[in-house]
Image: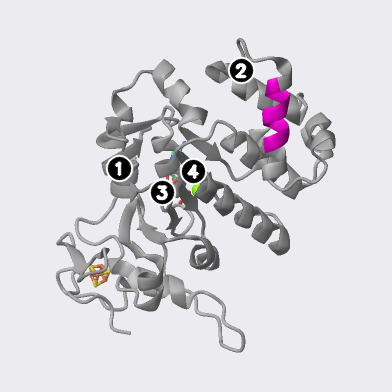
Amino acid sequence: MTLLEVKGLRVEFSGREEPVRAVNGVDLEIERGEIVGLVGESGSGKTVTSLSILGLIRQPGRITAGSILLDGTDLRTLGPEQLRAIRGARVSYVPQSPRGALNPLLRIGKQMENILVSHGEGGRQATAELRRRTVEMIEAVGISDPQRALRAYPHELSGGMAQRAVIANAMILRPDLVIADEPTTGLDVTVQAQILDLFSERVREQGAGALLVTHDLGIVANYCTRIAVMYAGRIVETGPARAVFQRPRHPYTVGLLRSVPVLGQPLFSMPGQAPDLRALPSGCAFAARCANVLPECAAVPPPWREVAREAHRFLCHLEDGAPL
Ligand SMILES: Nc1ncnc2c1ncn2[C@@H]1O[C@H](COP(=O)(O)OP(=O)(O)O)[C@@H](O)[C@H]1O
Ligand code: SF4
Ligand SMILES: [Mg+2]
């Protein structure tokens, strides 16, 4: 059974004005053992999609449609207690900032023990057993002096070490699905690579599935088996990472790939801006910026197109996608 199957997800933020349609019909699947890269410009709905899967959308936000199936169970039908039990144990989260994810007042080891205890693993388990689990996990995220790290308060750790601790927290209950939202933004490039190496190792070793949210296509190329490209609250192209990088079809994906700096070549920057999510056009949301726009694009919603034999799909009026 598919580990995660998101179907027709819609999320709105309402206020006094027209609602902000942050997510507009997202379909997303993740199998065990795969790392799916979710990419798109800032504001495209990546975080809102992630928080929806975790059941963490709060007022004034609201999921207005769709289903979020984890091993066939729709998380939208569960109550707050059931969701809380699932979070951490079956679905866990690595947020962008480790500072926000760690409790500044508690030692790292205590925080990890608390996670185990709050999911019923304390009880009859002796303190020594809890300790053993935390040491094992902190070693698994590549911290060489585990005793010292477990005794440390978050502010005593470097950014890279703190993010390792966050990953340890996210993995200690051996979740089936891990959602990491820009987990290495703000870290040095070398630390970034170390963190992503260990993240993908942990995911694979535990047989979990992962959603890796990033705006960095290099990260997707190195760590993801599949890619989902998001624009204005929709996935506009998805497929095996290799196939999409080799022959992107959606004009937006082509633009994103062209925006990756290449040594010795002038930097390309995509013209225009993302549309106002309060007033989306009836047709393709990318029409105002698209170099390949057709007369019908602005008014007629584009259809999904399949690239034969590749599990590669894109949302566009162009039958074969953008010419290269
Ligand atoms: N709490 C909120 N209130 C109103 N609008 C929000 C809120 N959170 C997110 N949004 C809107 O949802 C859109 C998508 O945001 P987000 O998912 O954070 O984008 P990304 O993670 O791709 O940068 C943004 O354009 C933003 O305006
Ligand atoms: S549907 Fe039209 S405007 Fe949208 S990406 Fe395709 S060609 Fe461009
Ligand atoms: Mg975000």
Q: Considering the numbered disc 4 on the image, is that residue within a helix, a strand or a loop?
A: strand
Residue at the farthest top position: 124
Rounded to the nearest angstrom, the CA distance separating label 3 from label 2 is: 34 Å
**Label 1 residue near ligand 1, CB within 8 Å:** no
Q: Which sits earlier in the primary sequence, circle 3 or circle 2?
A: 3
Badge 2 amino acid = Val
Q: Is the C-beta separation of discs 1 and 2 under 8 Å? A: no
The residue shown at (57%, 42%) is 95
Return the residue at label 1.
6
Visible residue check, residue 111: yes
Image position of 306 (left or right of 54): left
The disc at residue 45 is 3
- Seen in the picture, residue 124 relative to 256 is either above or below; the reply is above
Visible residue check, residue 270: no
Q: Position of residue 112 (x, y in %)?
A: 67, 28
Give the class, few, some or many, for how many residues have Cα within 10 Å of label 2's Cα (few <14, many ≥20).
some
Task: Give residue 146's quadrant in the image.
Answer: top right
Rounded to the nearest angstrom, the CA distance separating label 3 from label 1 is: 14 Å
Return the residue at label 4.
179
Return the residue at label 2.
117
